[in-house]
Amino acid sequence: MESLLGQGRAAIGLICDPDTFEENQVGAKTFDDPDFGPGAMVGTAKLDGQTVTVIGNDAEAFNEKFPVVYAGIIGMEEAYKMAQAVYATVAADVAKAKAEKRAIVLIVDTPGNGPGKTEEIFGMNKATGAYQLALAEARMAGHPIVAMVIGRAISGAFLCHGLQADHILSLDSSFGTMIHVMPLTSISRIVKKDIEVLEKLAEGNPVFAAGPQFFHRLGGVEEIVTTIEDMHAVVAKHVAEVRACKVKDQDDALGPWGRGSLGAERGGRVVRPEVIALLETEMDAVAKTYLPGAA
Amino acid sequence: MSNWSALQNRSFLESNARDRALGLVDEGSFTEFVGPFDRRTSPHLETLGEAVEFDDGVVTGIGKIGKTPVFVISQEGRFIGGSVGEVGGAKMVGTIKAAIAFAKRIAKDFPNAEEDEKPIIAISFETGGVRLHEANAGLLAHAEVMDQVQRARGHVPVVSLIGSKVGCFGGMGFVAAATDVVVMSEFGRLGLTGPEVIEQEMGKEEFDSADRGLVYRTTGGRHKYIMGDCNFLVDPEIAAFRAQLAELAKLPRAKFAEFRRIGTSELVEKQLKGVALAAKMQPKDARDVWVHVGNSDPVELGSMPLADFRKVVKRLAL
């Protein structure tokens, strides 16, 4: 079976214009220490001739300083390195208009965040939190961010590297792509339901089953890409779509909030918008009693 | 429901989400949003034949401390470990969104408002993150909460309160780290990977999750205060968390950026000094770091009364 699992480096060449990837250079920032955050690949490439920042996982790298980092795991150095690449992107285009700000392409193939004791002592949550805030800031500053899932997009690592993008694309599951919090077998054990029962339920409700098609139904993935050859064109198309929305100040259609609306449209998450609307109504009803000077 | 005055001296650790929410703000000032009477329960738990809660395990609303409007999100660890699903996640997102809109309204309509008349957001975390019964929706909700936390910046400060049994782990560990201020009690725990999972990944000899001392040294309030991941370490009663919130509410809103640990390029560079230290030290135990930053008797530091700890402790300066 054809698959890009563990081949983030090869995927860069397939998604971006061939031979344009300049690793370790983003705007004015040079990443010159080869031992720093090796599980993260950052750099600059061209996509249909336009400059883009590329951030991906290197499944072949092992971080000798932090041995929990291998096979595409995002450790503390990796997460901060990815955040640095995002801030360098924002800095490079700070004076440019929205239509000119370079896109960020996230190539996603990561099984998790560093699960170690040292990581907890120093704050793994802080490192990945930093990367998410950087992406959210870049997104709000006008940079189109498109994530392309080529392999594993697992739980907290997907939250960190993917779910803050404007649009998320995924190769379909025939390429071995995995998007989930936990595989259904583990969920079955934890919620104490037979796997057969869960599989049957998943046909009608995509909310706990593993796979890009279920995230698509929930609005968590904008588009499924069905061939490797299509990735380049589909990523470029989404960069253009996202940019068009930003130029028109239609940011609400993008990012996590936009995927919320998409989830309702596709019938996968219909309660969410009702709850948010009800909360807004209830707040409006009492707002004046909390305004300055109210008794 | 408990008597408000009695709540003040109650342990934050032992209190449920609603009591914490009520006790944090002034008596009688709390309005709950999408409360139990609205009965917005999880349709996904129902599909699986699981018990539901009428508030889906999170209490959201608005109250006041003095003149300050305080938007409150309070998670209930007793309901499926405080896990976040579609409904609870939407309540969190909606509350932060409402707070941002309210702050913008005040900025526009009340340009002369005093600092303490401007809103703040308080999130009382008690969660391991995503609710596995509705894992995909829970994960997507986490990303939305993070997005709102970034949107809140510069409009309304977000304060994390961590002192409940389950601690604050998983994807919500990211969210807490991303807020402006982190307030903990020594019983609060903050991290990404819970102790059982580290043991499973690394082996019992590396991390024994049954060793309560080790667990608290690694992610507990005292340690996170030494590391700077926690800005304020308070006494374990609800009143102490409330008093800290009241102090924060009086501050100029611009001051909150100074409490941040992450969220700018400069802060990332600063945190990387900590990562370099981690690489150099390869600590076997959090106590190694305590000693490194100048605390000569780490065993005593971990066990002395909190008031003494706050007086003598040396903290990591990056």
Image (cartoon, coloured by chain):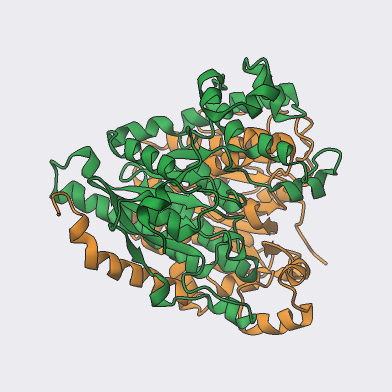
Chain colours: A orange, B green
Q: For this rendering, which residue is in front, A7 or B289?
A: B289
- Eyeballing the image, is B204 above or below B143? above
- Eyeballing the image, is A145 above or below A209? above
**Relative to B263, A111 lies left or right:** right
**Relative to B298, B141 lies left or right:** left
Res. A142 visible in picture = no
Residue A10: x, y in percent?
Answer: 73, 49
Quarter of the picture containing the N terminus of chain B is bottom left
Residue visible at 50% across and 78% down in the picture? A266
Q: For this rendering, which residue is in front, A72 or B132?
A: B132
Q: Quadrant of residue A19?
A: top right
Residue B290: x, y in percent?
Answer: 65, 22
Residue visible at 63% across and 73% down in the picture? A214
- Eyeballing the image, is A264 above or below B80? below
Residue A180: x, y in percent?
Answer: 67, 63
Residue A188: x, y in percent?
Answer: 75, 72
Quarter of the picture containing the C terminus of chain B is top right
Res. B189 visible in picture = yes
Residue visible at 67% across and 63% down in the picture? A179
Q: For this rendering, which residue is in front, A145 or B169?
A: B169
Q: How many marks?
A: 0
- Eyeballing the image, is A66 above or below A108? above
**Relative to B214, B190 lies left or right:** left
